[in-house]
Amino acid sequence: MTPQRILETIVEAHDNHRRTALCAIVATRGSTPQPAGILVCVDEAATMFGSLGGGCVEADVRRRAHQQLSKTHGELLTFKLDADFGYDDGMICGGQMDIAVCPIAPVQNIEPYRIALAALKTGEAVLPIRIQSKDQELMYRIHIETTPKLFIAGAGHISRVFARLALSLGFDVHVIDDRADYANENRFPPPMQTYVGDIATILKKQPLDPTAYVVIVTRGHKHDEAALEAVLESKAKYIGMIGSRRKIHVIFGDLKHKGVSEESLARVHAPIGLDIGAVTSDEIGVSIMAELIQVRRKTHHKSIEGPFPYPSEST
């Protein structure tokens, strides 16, 4: 579950007069199953939305967060991941995690969560949280990445495999094709979105900002070239196109003849995907997804600031 969806779950529960607790990894030491910045939430039914990596820690956080729901202040929990603390189920990492648990009551001010959700529509959000630690109140600031948007040009077999992988890995998936029997909810069920029409025309209308990824896997040379030409001047973070080296050479040659610069073409990942010797549709889908993850995680993301005394003089 994406951080955006977790914040939406908290706001929806608050608006319906239900309690939740936000749980955030605010610090790690040594080897841990998840890094700082990971968010989950727990509701009145003790259901956890999101994952801290599974195992005993996740179960313990869920239990203790549920116990905190009736309280008015957050708490910092420290987990030492070794057998001495009972975490001996095969997940002995040897590190430590500090997890802030912040109960959110229906009468509580939810505005910081609404502000963070609004900010995520265009970029990074910063969510301030407060906890009680011993005899003082502390504040952390959590930097949350916007959900990356993925636009897939072409709705064939590779797209179907790849789209499901991307959805499970936190991408907002949009699939475009000119064939209604391919781009539809039966093949790409919600929350994936499908568009039917001229692929290049639809791509030109999309918000291809620096959070966007474009994967071109249409059924033919002509459609690939038109789709690529439509997105080359966009600000998309990633543009990739499937095809043999010969096909790519021909398409690049056509676009150069139209005046497209070498610099623009150098942005394109083609042939698409990491070279893992993929052959089947499933394997090709995995290789494309691996390349997107590589690009997404290449830039270091600052996830946590703090703790600061509350009220913080640095705010």
Image: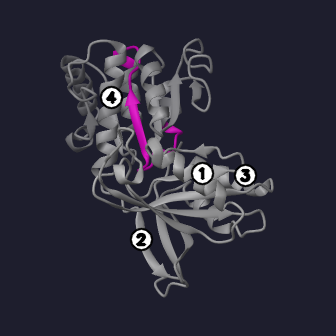
Local SS, label 1: helix
Q: Nearer the viewer, mark 4 or mark 3?
A: 3
Tell me the CA gap for discs 1 and 3: 22 Å
SS label for mark 2:
strand
Q: Which tag, 4 or 3, sits closer to the chain's start?
A: 3
Q: Determine the CA span between mark 1 and mark 4.
A: 38 Å
Task: State the image coordinates of residue 64 (x, y, percent, origin top left).
Answer: 59, 56
Report, in whole angstroms, how far the alpha carbon at label 4 lies from the one at label 3: 35 Å
Tell me the distance, in whole angstroms, between the alpha carbons under discs 2 and 1.
26 Å
The residue nearer to you, when weighing 134 against 99, is: 134
Q: Residue at x 23, y 33 (%)?
A: 256
Report the amino acid beneath label 3. Answer: Glu
Residue on which the image places disc 3: 12
CB under 8 Å between callouts 2 and 3? no
Residue at image position (74%, 57%) is: 14
Residue 152 image point, x, y percent: 45, 29
Q: Which residue is mark 1?
A: 63
Disc 3 is placed on an element classified as: helix
